Amino acid sequence: SQQGEEDPQALSIQEGENATMNCSYKTSINNLQWYRQNSGRGLVHLILIRSNEREKHSGRLRVTLDTSKKSSSLLITASRAADTASYFCATVQSGYSTLTFGKGTMLLVSP
Amino acid sequence: DAEITQSPRHKITETGRQVTLACHQTWNHNNMFWYRQDLGHGLRLIHYSYGVQDTNKGEVSDGYSVSRSNTEDLPLTLESAASSQTSVYFCASSEQGTGADTQYFGPGTRLTVL
């Protein structure tokens, strides 16, 4: 069953704008991860945030985690056309050791 | 550079045939995973392994099997292919003691069952 659900399903923005994607989940987690998938390719790990962390940064990426609301957000600042991809959140539930993926957000960044 | 490869990249087969998808990683990772990706479902875990001779069932394991005879390879076998198994299959690996850490994905195999 799907643990994480991304919102929105699709997002279209212009280069230079910020993109925000949200992920909600249902049960307690050990950590939450974000992955990117370019069309026709495998997934690439972007960032991991643990349940005792509230915010992490990596380059133009900012991830927040609110365990009280069971939600996370991924912010991509100053987006580029090369950021066009699908973005997935994945959770590791407490007591488990495997990833459960959401259905993803398709991001289109237009020049 | 270390990598994870899948073969074939594309496969067309007929209902009822046995099909094996290969996954090979040179990361020397203990953990390996197989997922399928379908529109509207995201990625779903089929089988996984935490080391040689270890295999475990995932969320959608019916009709699939795996075996782990060495660290580098985790082949996925469809015992009797069905049209419902038409999908894109991804293999992944991770280093740590559990699957809870970063996973590295292969490029995928697109399987069509006619």
Image (cartoon, rainbow, N blue to C red):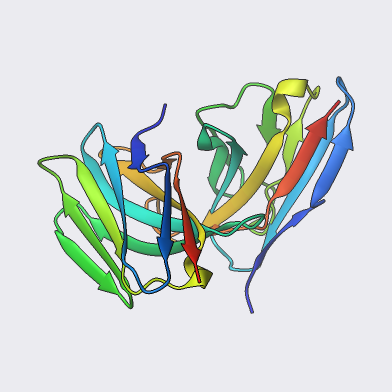
Which residue is painted at 56% across and 26% down in the image?
Answer: B60
Q: Quadrant of residue A14?
A: bottom left
Which residue is painted at 33% across and 75% down in the image?
Answer: A60
- Image vertical order of residue B111 relative to residue B51, above or below: above
Is A43 left, or right, of B78 in this rendering? Answer: left
Which residue is painted at 68% across and 28% down in the image?
Answer: B64
Which residue is painted at 69% across and 54% down in the image?
Answer: B73
Residue A50 location, x and y as percent? 23, 56
Is B45 left, or right, of B97 in this rendering? Answer: right
- Image vertical order of residue B49 relative to residue B28, above or below: above
Q: Is residue B83 visible?
A: yes
Is B32 left, or right, of A91 in this rendering? Answer: right
Q: Is residue B103 visible?
A: no
Q: Quadrant of residue B61?
A: top right
Residue B23 location, x and y as percent? 71, 53
Quadrant including the N terminus of chain A: top left
